[in-house]
Image (tube, helix red, strand yellow):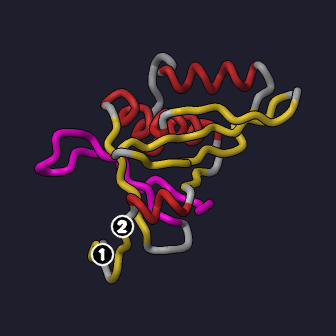
């Protein structure tokens, strides 16, 4: 697994959707995923530290987990198949550790609220990632 960080969320000119871009902590690879507007907003709110008057869905889930004494230990983008990304949320519960299937965008929105690390499987970066070299994208 490779540790990742959120670089940006936004509309890419010429694209029909919103893109979430992750970058390796210790490397030059980027991973761009098209995500929905609600998830993009949830991630942007967390990244920018915006205080919302009422909890968003991911805020609600984070509050519920805290009340149940469950901690998000990490999230990961674990697979890429037929242009679809797959994610997992790893949870530490009072009864032990579990993993839950999730869309990567939802997992990342939750991780940002809980301060949990974000990872990507190396096979995902090999299949869908791009490398940056002196500010240029290299496929």
Please tell me whether residue 121 belongs to the stretch shown in magenta: no
Q: Main secondary structure of the magenta part?
A: strand
Residue sticking out furthest to the bottom:
134
In the rendered image of this protein, does residue 83 appear above or below residue 123?
A: above
Residue drawn at (69%, 39%), measured in percent from left and top? 90
Decide if residue 63 is on the left or right side of residue 16.
Answer: right
Residue sticking out furthest to the left:
14
Q: Residue 125 location, x and y as percent?
A: 46, 62
Residue sticking out furthest to the right:
95
What residue is pinned by disc 1? Answer: 138
Q: Residue 29 location, x and y as percent?
A: 43, 69
Which of the two labelled residues, at mark 2 and mark 1, occupies the earlier sequence position? 2
The answer to whether marks 2 and 1 mark residues whose Cβ atoms lie closer than 8 Å is yes
Quadrant of the rendered image containing residue 42: top left
* Element on which disc 2 rests: strand
Question: How far, Cα to Cα, is label 2 from label 1?
Answer: 6 Å
What residue is pinned by disc 2? Answer: 130
Quarter of the figure with the C terminus: bottom left
Decide if residue 65 is on the left or right side of residue 24.
Answer: right
Quarter of the figure with the N terminus: bottom right
Which residue occupies the foreground of this view, 49 or 102?
102
In the rendered image of this protein, does residue 46 appear above or below residue 2?
A: above
Q: Which residues are magenta?
A: 1-24
Determine crowd level at label 2: few under 14, some 14-19, many 20+ residues with C-alpha closer than 10 A. Answer: some
Decide if residue 50 is on the left or right side of residue 91.
Answer: left
Residue drawn at (59%, 32%), measured in percent from left and top? 101
Q: Residue 36 location, x and y as percent?
A: 33, 32
In the rendered image of this protein, does residue 138 appear above or below residue 35?
A: below
């Amino acid at each position: 697994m490779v540790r990742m960080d959120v670089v940006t969320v936004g509309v890419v000119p010429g694209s029909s959707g919103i893109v979430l871009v992750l970058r390796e902590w210790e490397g030059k690879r980027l991973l761009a995923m098209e995500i929905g507007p609600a998830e993009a907003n949830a991630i942007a709110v967390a990244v920018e530290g915006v205080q919302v008057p009422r909890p968003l869905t991911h805020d609600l889930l984070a509050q519920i987990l805290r009340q149940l004494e469950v901690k998000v230990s990490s999230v990961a983008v674990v697979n890429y198949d037929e242009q679809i990304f797959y994610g997992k949320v790893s949870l530490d519960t009072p009864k032990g550790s579990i993993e839950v299937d999730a869309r990567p965008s939802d997992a990342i929105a939750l991780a940002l609220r809980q301060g949990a690390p974000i990872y990507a499987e190396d096979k995902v970066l090999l299949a869908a990632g791009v490398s940056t070299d002196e500010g240029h994208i290299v496929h």
